[in-house]
Amino acid sequence: MGKGAPRISNDIRALRFARGEMTQQELADRIGVTRQTVNAIEGNKYSPSLEVAFRIARVLDLPLEEVFQYEEN
Amino acid sequence: MDLTFEEKSLWVLFLGLLGVYGYYFSMVLPTDAVNVMPQHKVLFAVAVAYLVASQVVGHILIAIVDPRDETDERDRLIELKGTRVGSWVLAAGVFITLVVAVQTEGNFLFTHVLLGSWVLSQLVEIGSQLYLYRRGA
């Protein structure tokens, strides 16, 4: 997590804007993390737990694999 | 910088420890004392009081600036990683303290090696947490 090339990437930033320009704080409040954690996830600096990943996908109303991508190194 | 409540709290603790115990050790060391003297005990009590006061004031100021006192899974992960790093420093310090206790006369040196080890382990623990916050996790 957070070291070297990211293996799990995501499109949360773009998907937030596609959902009525949802702010990081709004997403953070809905999934129960801090805004800084949302920022770290969007920047591929932090890979969230499965629970938080599912919550994000649910808030964005998308399947998990459309929000997060796993890249084999 | 964009800091969480936890990160601000860690900075207050880090600076408090560094300032208070930096001052304490600069006043106590170097010395020829073999045993802990009454003036050392007074200075230590004052240092602890200053540390507590600095934390109370610092956290009140943080709460005024940032009322969102929230923690999440990333905070807990960073805390665990920092605690692991700090525990290695503390374990090494305890071992060095045992050697000092066996090899030296009186209680001054081993007491202060032990205190120094604890302060250093805390600084390393908090410093590594602050680094992890900047890196992401």
Image (tube, rainbow, N blue to C red):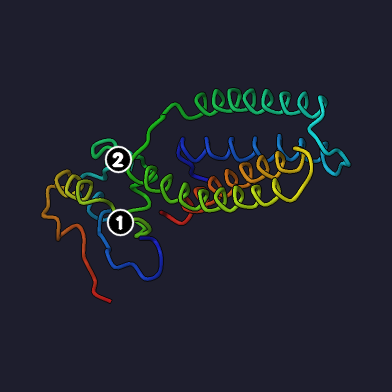
Which quadrant of the structure image shows residue A73? bottom left
- Kindly identify which chain the residue marked by label 1 belongs to: A
Amino acid type, callout 2: Ala
Residue that numbered label 1 is attached to: A47
With B14 as the anchor, is A20 left or right in this view? left
Q: Nearer the viewer, residue B54 or A59?
A: B54
Horizontal and vertical percent for residue A44?
A: 34, 60
Residue B34 percent across, percent down from the top left: 83, 39
Q: Give the mark toward the camera: 1 or 2.
A: 1
Is circle 1 on the same chain as circle 2? yes
Task: Name which residue lies at 50% across and 49% down.
Answer: B87
- Numbered tag placed on residue B90 in the rendering: none
Query: Which one is in front, B63 or B77?
Result: B77
SS type, badge 2 = helix
Residue situated in front as seen by the camera: B106 or A38: B106
Label 1: how many Cα within 10 Å (few below 14, some 14–19, many 20+): many
Q: Is residue B113 above or below residue A73?
A: above
Q: For numbered disc 1, what is the local secondary structure?
A: loop
- In the picture of the structure, the residue carrying the numbered disc 2 is A28
The residue lying at 33 percent from left, 47 percent from top is A38
Crowding near the residue tagged with mark 2, few <14, some 14–19, many ≥20 C-alpha atoms within 10 Å: some
Residue A11: x %, y % from top left: 25, 59
Relative to A9, B26 lies left or right: right
Please name the amino acid that badge 1 sits on: Ser
Q: CA distance from mark 1 to mark 2?
A: 15 Å
- In which quadrant will I find the C terminus of chain B? bottom left
